[in-house]
Amino acid sequence: MDLIIVTDSLNSTQPLLQVSKKLGHRILKYIGSDDEVAGYVELMHPDALIFICNEMDRMALREMKSVGEKQPTPILVFTRDSKEESIAAAVKAGASAYIVDCDDPARLGSLLDVAKARFKEQQQLRDELKQTKNALSERKSVEKAKGIIMKTKNLNEDQAYNAMRKLAMNHNKRIGEIAEQIISAAEVLV
């Protein structure tokens, strides 16, 4: 597994480094939390990102969130910060696992596996949510376009829908695209 480690203290990474080598993981880069982490993730495509810090700070949270927006990647956080608000902020920023006071770096392998599994599940949920929102938005557009057609052409609901469906098939487009065009045209004409 290819890893990027984000830390401001290389001394704190030594136990993890030794375990990583034993497990056959490769450390692609060590960077500080004040570096542009998302840029390195986009460039190097690691399998996971490990943040090692004493406390969660705004910079680390900002970088985690940036990674999630630009190049979603499993993120493990090793810290001494057990405050509830820090944990919540890290999870909200994209942490897949949050480990407090890990005395046994040999657990790294299983922690990485858990983080990757959790990340995969979260990505699936995000994708499903996005698809659902898009479908709902498209359905609203179709309903609005049907209303416009019904009003302007004096058709009933089924006739308006069939007219849109026929247009979509004739132009090899989705019905949602046709609906958006009808709405745009109606806005220009009114």
Image (spheres, rainbow, N blue to C red):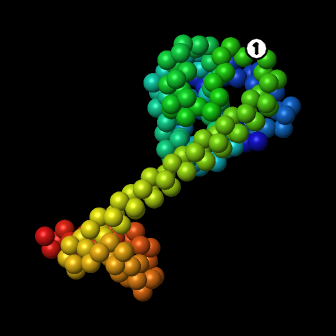
Q: Quadrant of the N terminus?
A: top right
Mark 1: amino acid = Asp
Q: Position of residue 72 (x, y in %)?
A: 57, 44
Whether residue 47 is situated above or below residue 22 in the rendered picture = below
Q: Position of residue 81 (x, y in %)?
A: 58, 14
Q: Residue furthest left?
A: 190
Q: Position of residue 170 (x, y in %)?
A: 42, 86
Residue placed at 40% from the left, 83% from the top?
Answer: 166
Quarter-of-image position of residue 90: top right
- In this picture, residue 94 sits left or right of residue 165: right
Q: Residue furthest bottom?
A: 170
Which of 103/94 is in front? 94
Quarter-of-image position of residue 53: top right
- In this picture, residue 63 sits left or right of residue 141: right
In the picture of the structure, the residue carrying the numbered disc 1 is 103
Q: Secondary structure beneath disc 1?
A: loop
Residue placed at 53% from the left, 41% from the top?
Answer: 68
Q: Residue furthest right?
A: 22
Quarter-of-image position of residue 32: top right
How many numbered marks have been drawn onto this rendered protein structure?
A: 1
Answer whether residue 45 is visible to the viewer in this image.
Answer: yes
Whether residue 14 is situated above or below residue 120 in the rendered picture = above
Answer whether residue 9 is visible to the viewer in this image.
Answer: no
Q: Position of residue 84 (x, y in %)?
A: 53, 15
Q: Quadrant of the C terminus?
A: bottom left
Which of 126/168 is in front? 168
Whether residue 178 is situated above or below residue 116 in the rendered picture = below
Residue placed at 79% from the left, 38% from the top?
Answer: 25
Residue placed at 32% from the left, 72% from the top?
Answer: 157
Query: Pointer 1: residues within 10 angstroms few (<14), some, or many (20+)?
Result: few
Which of 131/99 is in front? 131
